[in-house]
Image (spheres, rainbow, N blue to C red):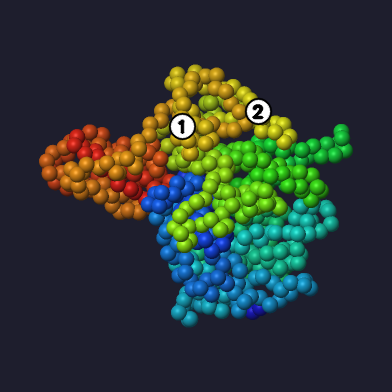
Amino acid sequence: MILVKSSHAQVTYSANDFAHLTPYTGYFQYGSNMGYYGPTWDDKSLADIAAGNQSKNVKGAGVKSLRLFLPEDFLETWGYDVRLDAFSHYNSLGISENVVVLENPSTAHMDPTHYSGCADQSRMFNNLYSPIWDGGANGTPVNDANYFALYVYKTVTRYKSKTRFWEIVNEPDLDYVGHSEQQPGEPGNWWDNNPDPCELAALKAPIFQYIRMLRIAYDVIKTIDPTAYIAPGGLGHPSFLDAVLRNTDNPVDGSVTAQYPLKGGAYFDVMSFHSYPAYALKSWDNSIMGFTYHRHSDAAANEFLNKMNSMKQVLINYGYNGTTYPSKIFICTESNIGRKPFNDAAGVPMIGSDMAQKNYNMKALVQSQKNQVVQFYSFVLGDTKFDSEATNELEVMGLYKKLPGIGPIPSGVYSQQYNNEGVAWKTTSDLIRNKHYDPARTAAMNIPANTEGAAFRDAAGNYAYVLWAKTTIDLSESAASSYNFPASMSMPAQVTKFEWDYSITGINTSIPSSGIALTGTPIFLFENFQLVNLSDSIRNNPPSAKEFQVKVLPNPASSVSYVQFTLKKPEKVRITLYDANGKAILRFINDQQFGTGTHNVHITNLSQLSNGVYYVRFETEIAKVIRKLVVVR
């Protein structure tokens, strides 16, 4: 490895500086890890079943963001442009704000060192400590001899318009030894000791080098795209985060020097974490001198929050509290529980049932939004085994049933089948995706202790509510409570109710807004809900509709768009924006008189919409015209 005494950086700020903070103001992202399912699937077809593709009559699973991998060894083999077409396809489906993982040096760029006498070679890039920048001496602004800097530069310059979130190495704190779980004072723990390189399965190198990767990534990515976000790649252990925050990238000992002035927290603005609650649903009980188990979906959702809060507390301990330094944005890029109860290391069955998995995912999505986690990525899009074949919980976590061998290549036929988890995920996404969590309205609901829920509000001021009875019994999803909306909320006498499987059944019912019976499975309630059958409107546009020459421009749009139409005579016009399900979310022209000629009407509040597919309905007294609008940022 080449060590030098100086590194010129184009970026003159860090994640410790408030002036350069890029707040995340978008809607919550319903994401998924894609997985690999053999040659009958490619990434485009997987994206089709994730987000839905109307042109192929694929409904999708309500997934509007993907966690993707662009490792250097792959890009060096196949070319850096190899995924551009696929990423454009994602955007065409309304998929955006993707998380892209950067990792895995090619063989030629791998550090050959065996650190601390490890049997395994380092998995890091060679020449990490070469200067990051060279002023364009080799045709790029970065130093081509710094292999990681060059890889980041070449990748981000190509894909920056497709995403803003960049994770550095998947699970850099992966630990098969167990010291990551030890408490302060215990031998080998990571709170008092820096992890040994041999313990870090994804790095096989000192933690200082990982901080160096964060520093290089922050400098290069922020120079290319100041609005981008940099994250450590899905941490599972607060003790590793503590080590990142207490060390610099100083290769000697992680100490602060003039050359290495900032600790690891200065080089990322997003805290990405992973949570698999099944492994932690127990607590020690002295009265029985053994563990008490809590294997139900609310305990799992609470454990998910515990993992997030434990990471947040470590950040606060180092000043990332919004006062000393900016608070970090939180995302979860892997989480789920299994559909079958496989045993843990001690031989005890973990949580695992169809109902528990379905309920956990719905509750985790709601709890994420209540607790400022702005993205949640399910692991994973599809199962790799049928339930009867599975040998571990990771094989039965998919939104879809077993995918290998049933893809649309080369037949062109999509034959995937939802798991109930996937149905529930799509229902949750379809009903509240274009809404923000409303803490004031939630507080007004006065939710009792045996019940959980939240209120959500869309750009037009319409509310949706999610409610469920809390589960409390080990290995059971049975729960019951009753809920009444307080009189102070001035709710209508009747509300519209949607069950977890609405995305498949299309069924909703009108129920009283008091005496609402709840179970352990969340339900969705709307004060008013009307759907327009957009597909019928598109098919049945009358011939006269062609006269109006309706266009939506630009399309896709990021912040500004307008409807352009031409009238041959004065007409009253109505223009309404619908989500992909046919729910009216914004009416910005309502029976307004327009004269003869071509008109441009701006779509207001576009910046408040989440990424995805929408439909603009243009109406006069003689015709209705539907146009698709894709919002991508």
Quadrant where the N terminus sits is: bottom right
Question: Mark 1 touching mark 2, by CB under 8 A?
Answer: no
392 vs 580: above or below: below
- Residue 176 is situated, as x and y percent measured from the top left of the image, at 75, 59
Quickly name the residue at label 1.
Answer: 507
Residue at the image position 61 percent from the left and 28 percent from the top: 519
Residue 548 visible in the displayed image: no
Q: Earlier in the sequence, mark 1 or mark 2?
A: 2
> In the image, which is nearer the foreground, mark 1 or mark 2?
1
**Between 239 and 29, the one nearer to me in the picture:** 29
Give the CA distance from mark 1 to mark 2.
23 Å
Instruction: Describe the element under mark 1 as helix, strand or loop.
Output: loop
Query: Quick check: 445 above or below 288?
Result: above
Corner quadrant of residue 210: bottom right
> In percent of the image, x 63 and y 53: which residue is there?
385
| Relative horizontal placement of residue 32, taking residue 592 as reference (left or right) | right
> Is disc 2 surrounded by few (<14), some (14 to 19) or many (20+) residues within 10 Å?
some
Picture residue at 31% right of the left edge, 36% below the top: 587
Q: Which residue is mark 2?
A: 479
Residue type at numbered disc 2:
Ala
Give me the disc on residue 46.
Answer: none
Residue displayed at 52% across by 26% down? 444
Residue 487 at x, y = what percent?
A: 49, 18
